[in-house]
Amino acid sequence: GAGVSQTPSNKVTEKGKYVELRCDPISGHTALYWYRQSLGQGPEFLIYFQGTGAADDSGLPNDRFFAVRPEGSVSTLKIQRTERGDSAVYLCASSPGGGQDLVLTFGAGSRLTVL
Amino acid sequence: QKEVEQNSGPLSVPEGAIASLNCTYSDRGSQSFFWYRQYSGKSPELIMFIYSNGDKEDGRFTAQLNKASQYVSLLIRDSQPSDSATYLCAVREYNFNKFYFGSGTKLNVKP
């Protein structure tokens, strides 16, 4: 697509529930990133995919968080047993595969509220 | 954890003035440096990037990089009320594709 698409734009859930957030990157972009942004903070790195594999998942806060990108395009961030502290905007970004001019283009984000 | 530090602001400047935004980073191995603008409730959008010491100009924006001092800045000339936003500094590690963000500086341009 023309830009990075994220769904849903807003998700309200109850503590303990399971949530999936979807990201459709720019067509042809091989790198895909997930970030989390809390109010008043900068984006916090979660995980980065190069193609289908997670190249770096060191930012995932704990084992309740998991992300997949099975065909090297769309990615899904999965959060199990949600907690109130998971409330944030989850940003997806994509980038061409590499090179010195590697830049991130962000989607509009998915705002997650855990009640 | 790599650190990217920014003054949270708010930085207030009158319309038409030069706004100067600053960022320091902890990792000397950092390779590329980015400035993103984020309007309230919106996602970050890229303004410009720089990877060589010195200045890089793009319209009203100038990025300045000093690797020895681990310092990068963004100058906005002829500031407009529409420039009012939070400006995020981001740093990319050398040989890695991970980007670290500062917490942003809020800029208010007063008409």
Image (cartoon, coloured by chain):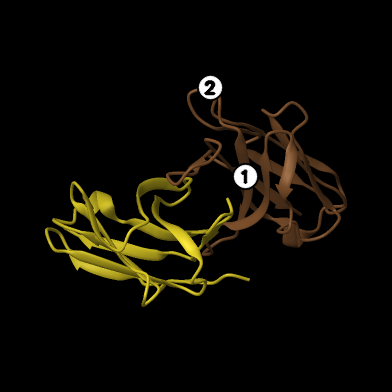
**x then y, percent, for residue A104:** 49, 44
Q: Colour of chain A?
A: brown
Q: Position of residue A43 (x, y in %)?
A: 56, 57
Query: Are both tags, 1 and 2, on one chain?
Result: yes
Q: Which residue is more in the foreground, A106 or B17?
A: A106
Q: Quadrant of the C terminus of chain A?
A: bottom right
Residue identified by numbered label 2: A1
Q: Which mark is residue B28?
A: none
Q: Amino acid at mark 1?
A: Tyr
Residue B64 seen: yes
- Disc 2: which chain? A
Q: Chain of mark 1?
A: A
Whether residue A108 sits left or right of residue B65 in the image: it is right
Between B17 and A58, the one nearer to me in the picture: A58
Residue A37 screen position, x and y as percent: 59, 56
Helix, strand, or loop for circle 1? strand
Q: From the viewer's perspective, is A7 left or right of A100?
A: right
The foreground one among A89 and A97 is A97
Crowdedness of circle 1 by 10 Å Cα count: few (<14), some, many (20+)? many
Chain assigned yellow: B
Position of A103 relative to A84 (above/below): above
Image coordinates for residue B36, horizontal then vertical, percent: 40, 52
Task: Give me the residue at 60% from left, 38% from top.
Answer: A31
Point 45% across, 48% down: residue: B44
Identify the secondary structure beneath mark 2: loop
**Disc 1: which residue:** A33
Q: Is residue A98 above or below residue A38?
A: above
Regarding residue B90, the answer to whether it shows in the image is no
User: Could you classify mark 2 by the number of other residues whose Cα lies within 10 Å: few (under 14), some (14-19), or many (20 or more)?
Assistant: few
Q: Is residue B17 above or below residue B83?
A: below
